[in-house]
Amino acid sequence: MPEHAAATGAAAEEHIRATSSPPPLPPSDGPTTSATPLSTDGPGIVQPATFLRSYAVRPPAITRATERERPAATLSAADKEQTDALRAIRAFLKVRTSYDVLPLSFRLIIFDTALLVKKSLGILIQNGIVSAPLWDSKTSTFAGLLTTSDYINVIQYYWQFPDELARIDQFRLDSLRAEIERAIGAPQIETVSIHPERPLYEACRKMLESRARRIPLVDIDDETQRAMVVSVVTQYRILKFVAVNVKETEQLRKPLKELNLGTYTGLQTADMDTPVMDVIHMLVKKNISSVPILDRQGIVINVFEAVDVIALIKGGVYDDLQLTVGEALLKRSDDFAGIYTCSVQDRLDTIFDTIRKSRVHRLVIVDEEGKLKGVLTLSDILEYVLLEGEEEAW
């Protein structure tokens, strides 16, 4: 199969640089200021709360269930504005296709399933990407999407069978499904895909149903009538596409607290001295993509992401899995963007504005002191935008 080059932009992840402690959040009714990282010994924590606009006093909080049950005749002006905005976003997603999201110029890296796992790691790092479509050259078929979860499965296999390290070094990508995932009882490689001419709304629903954060676009070649991978679309790119093109996002003026949006209970946390393997076990056990890192006062100082494991096992060397979180984070490159934070009082319109301006993959929800309150993921936002108050089937 010829080598494909295609954009890493849609699949690339942003990372976070360690810092001593975050600057305090601005008051909820304060003036708008520009966001600047902490400038002590290096890039600090970027706080999108400094992007957020001031807001007035809001009506009493209501839950999602209550909001759905309220008759249309009793909707307040704010409720109606919120509902109209959601309808506008859904209508937009139903008339635009996945092709529309793609940039004019991009590169795509496609891995043959016969490639060695350790070589695939080097290619990901060299090209600054964290996932790649898989192609079976024997059958000329799309074979799924390789993500950081699959490399975490390799780590778990090594952890359970340390005597197998010599064999792991010779594993090819097709071994992930045939041997590694079966041995540790992990889910198989994601195979969900969508035709690029299908509506974006359908792509979003497929991602939510499969809990995938990205979806490959697979077309049919007119001459050979065989499948071909066009690109990969991420939740971030879709939400940014909405933020840029749907002006009604400015009507989403309700704060996170009223929307009950985000995760606030059962949060997994660690500190700089926590062993990396303990954090990896958290990622697997809770099926999450990140773990907030706190100091002794409970203040958020960093986030360990699933993508961080790639730098730890590059070249097929697994010694760095013995490191602490603090030591592991030092292996990140210098261009990591920082942690994005918000408060429960921040509004969804300002969150969309942050997504439009910055590459955001999650927001850590903190209080006035910078202490952890919850986590807001792009999956949370996408689910709310697509499903809130939606009863009809797609």
Image: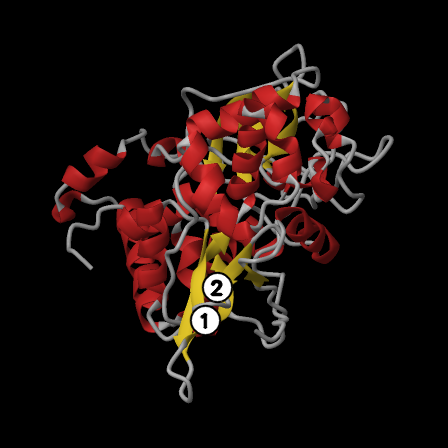
Q: In which quarter of the image is residue 287?
A: top left
Dot 1 corresponds to which residue? 140
Whole-percent x, y for residue 346 in the image: 49, 37
Spatial CA span between label 1 and label 2? 5 Å
Judged from the image, the secondary structure of the residue bearing numbered disc 1 is: loop
Q: Which residue lies furthest to the bottom in this view?
A: 223
- Residue at x 45%, y 38% (from the top left corner): 181
- Residue at x 28%, y 59% (from the top left corner): 87
Q: How many labels does the image show?
A: 2
- Residue at x 42%, y 19% (from the top left corner): 266
Of the pair 291 and 57, the residue shown nearer to us: 291
367 relative position to 264: left or right? right
Q: Residue furthest right?
A: 41
Q: Could one spot residue 366 in this view of the protein? A: no
Whole-percent x, y for residue 294 in the image: 63, 19
| Label 2 CA crowd tier, 10 Å (few <14, some 14–19, many 20+) | some
Kind of residue at disc 1: Ser
